[in-house]
Image (spheres, rainbow, N blue to C red):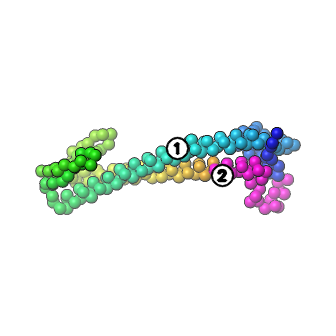
Amino acid sequence: QAVATAAPGAPPSLRNAMAQAIGMDEVDDEDPEVPVAVLDAKIAQYEGFIDDVLKRELQRALDDFRSGAALLEDCRELRRNIDLLLTGNVTELETTVELGCQFFVKAFVPDTSRIFVDVGLGFKLEMPLAEAQDFLEHKEAFVLSGLDLRKRRIAEVKADIRQALHLLDMMTQVKSGQQPWLAACEPELIESFS
């Protein structure tokens, strides 16, 4: 049966940690071999976890961030339009409105002093332009705080993916007979553990 060495030169705690990562209880000092079949199974398990869980979670987090960024842009655009109405002292307005599927109609707004604003959960509230501008300022701050949380979540998922890929790399190095945890150590340090 094919086996891979489970850190014969490493300290016992490091060998046991590696053994636990690949699904073994503990490594005996006399028999530090790990079956290649066990390593192959763990490698496949980690690859599946990265593809099935972590990458999907990253895609969900990115989609959430993009939807929040689109909402923020809509708020900012509405604030700019309200600012134009207030500074230009516009009392009535002619515009075109999209009904859907690139179908536009002309619209006339006889009184621009009040506007309906989506306040959330599908509710729209009629308010004066100045009040709507203040509300949108607060909504922007709320959406920005949500975007910060989403950025942190994206960074966490990316870090999880990097860690899982690093563990996969270490397992493939162990499978090929290398000792990746000792590669960066000074020879004197390795000897001090013996």
* Side of 16 where 130 appears, left or right: left
Q: Which residues are magenta?
A: 165-194
Nearest to N terminus: mark 1 or mark 2? 1
Q: Position of residue 88 (x, y in %)?
A: 17, 62
Q: Position of residue 173 (x, y in %)?
A: 73, 51
As shown in the figure, which amino acid type bears the numbered disc 1? Arg
* Side of 111 where 14 appears, left or right: right
Closest to the observer, 167 or 189: 167
> Is residue 176 one of those drawn in magenta?
yes
Q: Position of residue 48 (x, y in %)?
A: 61, 42
Residue at position x 79%, y 46% in the image: 4
Q: For the N terminus, give its image quadrant.
A: top right
Residue at position x 64%, y 43% in the image: 46
Residue bearing the label numbered 2: 166
Q: Do labels 1 and 2 touch, CB within 8 Å?
A: no
As shown in the figure, which amino acid type bears the numbered disc 2? His
Q: Callout 2 environment at 10 Å: few (<14), some (14 to 19), or many (20+)?
A: few
Is the stretch drawn in magenta largely helix, strand or loop?
Answer: helix
Q: Position of residue 129 (x, y in %)?
A: 21, 52
Residue at position x 13%, y 54% in the image: 92
Residue bearing the label numbered 1: 56
Q: Callout 1 environment at 10 Å: few (<14), some (14 to 19), or many (20+)?
A: some
